[in-house]
Each structure stands twice: as C-alpha cells, then as structure tokens.
Amino acid sequence: MVKLNSIEEVDLLANTKSAKKRIAIIKKRTLRNKMIKSRVKTFIRRFNESLATKDIEAIKERLRLAVKELDKAVSKGVLHKNTAARKKSKLYAKFNALLKSASNE
C-alpha cells in the first residue's frame, strides 16, 4: 500500500480526464477551506488577545466579529454547526466570566 502525503502525489495517479478535474476541484476547495479556517482562527485569536485589555466595548465588538466569522464558515460548509456552536460557547463563557469579574470589582 502506497502512502500519499499530498494531493500533488495523487495527481500523478489520475488517469482519466474526470479524475484530473476532480483533483483540480479538490485543490481549489482545500485552499478556500484553509483560508476560511485561518480567518476564523485569526478572529478568535484577536478576541482572546482583547480580553487582556479589559475594555468591555472593544471585547464585545471582537466577540461579535468572531461569532460572525464562525457563522460564515458554517454557512459555507467549512465548519460543522456543532463545532461552531462549541467554539461560540467557549467565547461567550470567557466573555461572561470577564463581565462577572468586572462587576465584582
């Protein structure tokens, strides 16, 4: 059994025109999915970084943007809806914990 590490290696195995076309489509979709996932991770990272500032309005805006990106990824089929829900839940939990600690001070 041959272990293939990338789509390029699979490309060498394709014989038919339709197989080559499918490989091209997969490459394009993989690139698109990577871009969307990277964008989601960036927005989540920005939210997490903004937690240190303790500026509630800025954090709220970053949370809104992160949730928006997660929802976009779900609508494009890049993330499963339950995955996005889990990630949003974690973000909201962090935000609510910050609000709770801010109200106690």
Image (cartoon, rainbow, N blue to C red):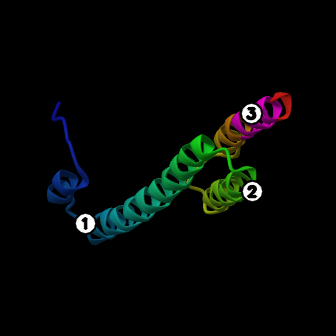
Q: Earlier in the sequence, mark 3 or mark 1?
A: 1
Tag 3–tag 1 contact (CB < 8 Å): no
Instruction: Tell me the quadrant of the picture where the N terminus can be found.
Output: top left
Name the residue beneath numbered marker 1: 16
Circle 2 or circle 1, nearest the eye: 2
Residue 4's place in the image compared with 74, above or below, is: above
Q: Earlier in the sequence, mark 2 or mark 1?
A: 1
Residue type at numbered disc 3 = Ala
Query: Is residue 94 highlighted in magenta?
Result: yes
Residue type at numbered disc 2 = Glu
Tag 2–tag 1 contact (CB < 8 Å): no
Name the residue beneath numbered marker 3: 93
Circle 3 or circle 1, nearest the eye: 3
Which secondary structure, mark 2?
Answer: helix
Residue interval drawn in magenta: 92-102
Name the residue beneath numbered marker 2: 57
Q: Specify whether 34 is left or right of 59.
A: left
Q: Specify whether 16 is left or right of 57.
A: left
User: Which residue is located at x 77 percent, y 29 percent?
Assistant: 101
- Of residue 99 and residue 28, the one placed in the foreground of this image is 99
